Amino acid sequence: MRTILQTKNLKKVYRTKESIFQALDNIELTVREGEFVGIMGPSGSGKTTLLHLFATIDEPTSGEIEIAGTDIMQLNEDQRSSFRRKQLGFIFQDYNLLDTLTVKENILLPLVLEKMKVAEMEQSVNEIASRFGIQSILDKYPYQISGGQKQRTAASRAMIARPSLLLADEPTGALDSKSATDLLESLKNVNETDKVTILMVTHDAFAASYCKRVIFIKDGKTFTELVRGNHSRKDFFQKVINVLPVLGGNIDDTL
Ligand SMILES: Nc1ncnc2c1ncn2[C@@H]1O[C@H](COP(=O)(O)OP(=O)(O)O)[C@@H](O)[C@H]1O
Ligand SMILES: [Mg+2]
């Protein structure tokens, strides 16, 4: 399988006037096409920092990041935003939908920016909406739908341009357990059916149990990794749970 994401000796140091803080140290990561990888770690361990580097929102202090064959540090600002639109999809904890647009318009936004033809856009939006079970709410506005529906809208928007890599930061963080399960089932479905590569940061062992591989980070370093293999999701959940006490820190604090 093609390598979608590869990092070498990734470091991130935050410098302020008063202090220097090393948020990431020597992160070596390889994600292959079609994987569904979870990243778990205590609050403050560097998960969001890592995702921001992959999202090309922030730059590492040193080290290399290659995504879908592109060394993202070599891109200028214009190339970077084009790369982001074409190769990456994002899901955030707080949905980030535009309130003045309908569900359908929110999902279509990335394609409008790509100047795609209307008929093609219609087909794409219908396909992706059916994957995420939101066909019936396409004409509603964000304030008219539930949190779970908002997150499935955000996931549809993230997927519509068929990105090489879907990045999700605590996507179930604001959802009740039924909505979280629906979202995770949909992500599992697009991962298995469309071979979409997913990297999901989560503090939640239940969410992590949907992944095929979970990487644990602690104090900005890779701590250990679990591969689901032939285990059932329930068994894998138990394996993830067993790592948490060893990992230490406050895993339930999502802030
Ligand atoms: N912009 C920043 N400036 C200084 N320190 C930061 C900044 N962003 C994050 N940090 C620090 O880096 C560490 C890792 O943060 P973060 O990646 O948000 O962790 P996580 O998502 O795992 O909770 C934390 O100690 C945090 O305080
Ligand atoms: Mg975070």
Image (tube, rainbow, N blue to C red):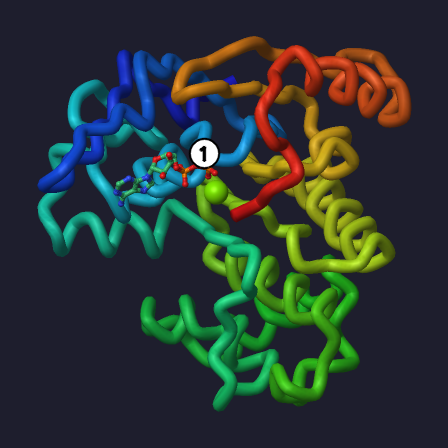
Can you tell which quarter of the image residue 10 is in? top left
How would you rate the neighbour count of disc 1 (Cα within 10 Å): few for under 14, some for 14-19, many for 20 or more? some
User: Looking at the picture, how far across and down is residue 142, in whole percent?
Assistant: 61, 82
Q: Is residue 39 above or below residue 134?
A: above
Note whether residue 62 is visible: yes
Q: Left or right of 182: which side holds 149?
A: left
- For label 1, the SS is loop
The residue drawn where x is 42% and y is 27% is 4
Q: Left or right of 231: which side holds 26?
A: left
Note whether residue 34 is visible: no
User: Looking at the picture, how far across and down is residue 159, in whole percent?
Assistant: 54, 55
Whether disc 1's CB lies below 8 Å from ligand 1 is answered yes
User: Looking at the picture, how far across and down is residue 57, in whole percent?
Assistant: 27, 48
Q: Left or right of 87: which side holds 171?
A: right
User: Looking at the picture, how far across and down is residue 137, in whole percent?
Assistant: 73, 81
In the depicted view, which residue is nearer to us: 129 or 12? 12
Can you tell which quarter of the image residue 125 is in? bottom right
Residue on which the image places disc 1: 44
Q: Quadrant of ligand 1?
A: top left
Give amino acid for label 1.
Gly
In the depicted view, which residue is nearer to us: 119 or 109? 109
The residue drawn where x is 55% and y is 65% is 95
The residue drawn where x is 47% and y is 40% is 165
- As drawn, the residue found furthest toward the front would be 18
